[in-house]
Amino acid sequence: MTFKDQVTKLLEDALQEKPNLFLVDFSISNTNKINIILDGDEGVNLQDCIDVSRAVEHNLDREELDFELEVASVGVGSPLKFVRQYKKNIGRYLVVKTNDQTIEAILSAADDKKITLSWEAREPKKIGKGKETVQKSLELSYNEIKEAIVTIKF
């Protein structure tokens, strides 16, 4: 069993014990630096990272192979990669890039096939002069999205 296979198995076992967590990214460099990025349905706390780190580190032998281990939660500015991440971020602001446009809006719904974005826009009145605020909505399938990032509004 290769080092990567061994780490992968340990990581899978650790995540089975914490079903609310899921793997976003995992890599092992040429210098045996293990980098694990986690997300969770209710977020990821420090104890979650510690538990996963211990589950991996305590079952590897440093005498056999020296390694470095980093376990972290996904950052706010990181792109969303999985449907599960979209579902957990309903109600938050996203910046979504497609082939045609960039939209900053609230993620109002997400299912297994698409997301729905909602925002307000100022448009010319249909009758008379001036502008009015209108509610806009757009459905996008996941394959239309090039990148989606959660943003924080103050």
Image (spheres, rainbow, N blue to C red):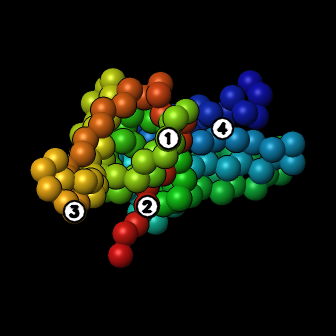
What's the CA distance linking mark 4 and mark 2? 33 Å
Identify the amino acid type marked 1: Gln
Q: Which of marks 4 and 2 is nearer the N terminus?
A: 4
The local secondary structure at tag 2 comes to: strand
- Disc 2 target residue: 151
Badge nearest the viewer, 4 or 2: 2
Q: Which amino acid does label 4 sit on?
A: Val
Which label belongs to residue 130? Answer: 3
Which of discs 1 and 3 lies nearer the camera? The answer is 3
> Which amino acid type corresponds to the residue marked 3 in the rendered image?
Gly
Viewport quadrant of the N terminus: top right
Q: How far apart are marks 3 and 4 (CA)?
A: 62 Å
Q: Residues within 10 Å of mark 4 (few under 14, many from 20)?
A: many
Label 1 sits on a secondary structure element that is loop
Residues packed near mark 3 inside 10 Å, few (<14), some (14 to 19) or many (20 plus): few
The residue carrying mark 1 is: 101
Q: Do tag 3 and tag 2 residues touch (Cβ < 8 Å)?
A: no
Q: Which residue is drawn at 83% across and 51% down?
A: 66
Cβ atoms at labels 1 and 3 below 8 Å apart: no
**Numbered disc in front, either 3 or 2:** 3
The numbered mark, 1 or 2, whose residue comes first in the sequence reads 1
Tell which circle, 1 or 4, labels the residue nearer the N-terminal end.
4
Q: Residue at x 87, y 42 (%)?
A: 30
Instruction: Confirm whether residue 90 shows in the render.
Output: no
Circle 4 sits on which residue?
Answer: 7
